[in-house]
Image (cartoon, helix red, strand yellow):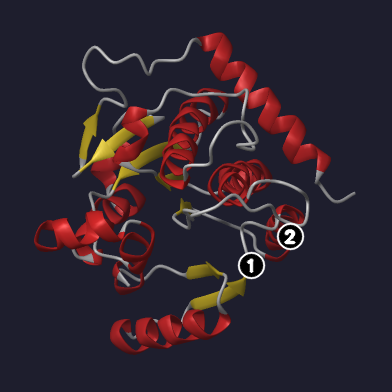
Amino acid sequence: MAIAKKGGTIHMVCRNKDKAEEARAEIVKDSGNKEIFVHILDLSETKKVWEFAESFKKKYKALNVLINNAGCMMTKREVNGEGLEKSFASNSLAMYILIKSLIPLLEKSPDSRVITVSSGGMLVQKLRTGNLQSQRGRYDGTMVYAQNKRQQVVMTEQFAKAHPSIHFSVMHPGWVDTPTIANAMPDFHSSMKERLRTPEQGADTVVWLAVSEAAGKNPSGRFFQDRQMVSAHLPLAWTHSSQLEDQKFMSVMEDLAKSFQPH
């Protein structure tokens, strides 16, 4: 809504057609901006993510901003049609594939940016590459989600190094009152109800990172909260991964992504 009001052309990539069309109608009505397009895609379906990104690249000549906002938190371990754990497929691999596929389009566009909505939950997780599909141990959806969110931070840092002409950032929106929080973390939701943010407050830093001149002046690859660059680790934290671990993770992601790439 905020970017539409500023005159941006918006491509909404959504899973649920009815909700997407409803949101689109509301955005058009409130912003007066008709350049709002809906694309239906379930980000947990890995091959379809590739197909979407590749066809988008053929159809459109420019992409200034990619916002990776969709996410999922599972209560039990489920796999997608490709045999990948759904949380990892939606939160991590889909982000990797969208960025990887759309980089040529972003590089052609002026002042291009990639913003990923992570979570403060990642502060309690160190990058782990040995159990990406959560096959070992008891499945804890909240911790799997937090691990995916740490993976997003590492991917942002690594993509920023590899593609200096694009501004990459990752951010924590704060704890926002959304159906996801209510459904996936009911106890947290009811105890925190009074202190949760509105969607507009949660989106503020995303919008700022996407369109403001000031945001683009910050170094690429960094973590943000409330329009401020903040550390991606707590003080004295054990959550730092080595350069070798980060590179190993990226090459695992590269191989996984490639294995589902349509030829």
Hey, which quadrant is residue 125 in on the image? top left
Label placed on residue 48: 2
What residue lies at 57% left-to-right and 32% top-to-bottom?
137
Q: Amino acid at mark 1?
A: Leu
Residue assigned mark 1? 41
Task: Indicate which disc, 2 or 1, sits on the residue closer to the N terminus.
Answer: 1
Residue 86 position (above or below residue 131): below
Structural crowding at the residue carrying mark 1, measured as other residues with C-alpha within 10 Å and reported as few (<14), some (14–19) or many (≥20):
some
What residue lies at 39% left-to-right and 38% top-to-bottom?
169
* Mark 2–mark 1 CB contact (< 8 Å): yes
Can you give x and y, in whole percent of width and height, for residue 187 in the image? 25, 57
Q: Which quadrant is the N terminus positioned in?
A: bottom left
> Which type of secondary structure does the marked residue at label 1 adopt?
loop
- For this orientation, the residue located farthest to the right is 263
In the image: residue 116, left or right of residue 252 = left
- For this orientation, the residue located farthest to the front is 138
Q: Amino acid at mark 2?
A: Lys
Can you give x and y, in whole percent of width and height, for residue 30 in the image? 29, 85
Count of picture labels: 2
In the image shown, does 59 or 46 lie closer to the viewer? 46
Residue 64 position (above or below residue 248): below
Residue 248 position (above or below residue 95): above
- For this orientation, the residue located farthest to the left is 194
